Image (cartoon, helix red, strand yellow):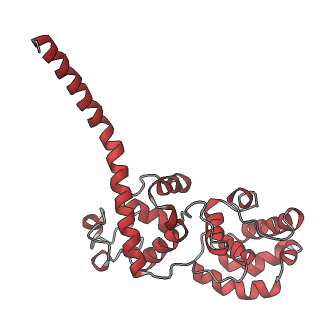
């Protein structure tokens, strides 16, 4: 090969090298995150063998309403409200006929009670008028209901219908997805998209519940218990957070 040919080959190889180098930061992190999340799920399943929502319910309607009440409220608080609430309003028709002010008083301790009461009455009317009084079992139909976004729909689908159409992103999942470097996004729907790209679909049903349980018990917003964490060897944030007590997103 002549000198010109060698130079041309060298330029091509250099160009290819630059292309690989340029694309690597986008390709390899995805592979790394996908491998990390599989390890995380395996370890968390051993630690929490029965992942499920902490909300108490008997029917899809009860879970739907409980999940709406749980927005900006603890599951523990909601579980104190719902026994009396579901006794007073045993059927969807009862919620549909409820008086706004009266329902507000019934759920006042859940916070944001005006909006929640308004949405519960409106979605109950819609269920009666358009769905025969039954909670739909698809993402497409659930998010048409007043006050129901993807997070609520995902929880209802996963727990009440055992259907995986996405991954519920609440405050715990958002925080842990950031700490585990599974997503750099801050908006729930964008975080969900990132997670759906790397979490095996077979694990979508339980993924939220696994992270919520770990987030409540160990990976807390304030003073995370990193030194007791079973994931410390694979957590990218361990060295930064261990012993700091710093609040993270």
Viewer-proximal residue among 124 and 138? 138
**The quarter of the displayed image where residue 222 is located:** bottom left
**Quadrant hosting residue 42:** bottom left
**Residue 130 visible from this viewpoint:** yes
Residue shown at 74%/58% (left/top)? Answer: 141
- Residue 211 x/y as whole percent: 46, 71
Q: Nearer the viewer, residue 120 or 8?
A: 8
The N terminus lies in quadrant: top left
Residue located at (69% from left, 84% from top): 81
Residue 163 coordinates in the image, percent (x, y): 63, 67
Looking at the image, how many numbered discs can be counted on the residues?
A: 0
The correct choice, above or below, for 58 with respect to 207 in the image is below
215 is higher (above) or lower (below) than 35: below
Please state the horizontal and vertical placement of residue 165, each as a whole percent of the image.
Answer: 61, 60
Residue closer to the observer: 159 or 95: 159
Quadrant, the C terminus? bottom left
Give the quadrant of residue 121.
bottom right
**Residue 109, above or below 183:** below
Residue 164 picture location, percent across and down = 59, 64
Q: Which residue does the image show at 72% across and 75% down from the upper left?
A: 60
> Which residue corresponds to the image point at 57% horizontal and 81% vertical from the top-left?
54
Outermost front residue: 1
Q: Is residue 111 visible?
A: no
């Amino acid at each position: 090969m002549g000198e010109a040919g060698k130079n041309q080959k060298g330029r091509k190889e250099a160009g290819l090298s630059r292309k690989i180098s340029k694309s690597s930061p986008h390709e390899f992190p995805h592979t790394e995150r996908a491998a990390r999340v599989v390890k995380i799920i395996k370890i968390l399943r051993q630690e929490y063998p029965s992942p499920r929502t902490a909300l108490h319910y008997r029917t899809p309607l009860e879970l739907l309403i409980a999940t709406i009440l749980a927005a900006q409220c603890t599951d523990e608080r909601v579980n104190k409200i719902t026994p009396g609430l579901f006794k007073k309003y045993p059927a969807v028709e009862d919620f549909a006929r409820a008086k706004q002010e009266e329902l507000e008083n019934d759920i006042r301790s859940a916070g944001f009670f005006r909006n929640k009461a308004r949405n519960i009455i409106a979605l109950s009317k819609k269920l009666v008028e358009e769905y025969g009084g039954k909670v739909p079992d698809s993402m497409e139909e659930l998010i048409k209901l007043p006050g129901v976004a993807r997070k609520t729909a995902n929880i209802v689908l996963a727990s009440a219908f055992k259907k995986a159409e996405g991954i519920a992103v609440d405050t715990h999942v958002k925080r842990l997805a950031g700490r585990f470097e599974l997503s750099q996004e801050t908006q729930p729907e964008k975080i969900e998209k990132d997670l759906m790209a790397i979490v095996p679909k077979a694990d979508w049903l339980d993924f939220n519940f696994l992270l919520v349980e770990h987030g409540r018990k160990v990976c807390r917003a304030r003073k995370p218990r990193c030194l007791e964490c079973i994931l410390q060897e694979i957590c990218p944030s361990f060295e930064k957070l261990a012993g700091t007590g710093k609040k993270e997103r």
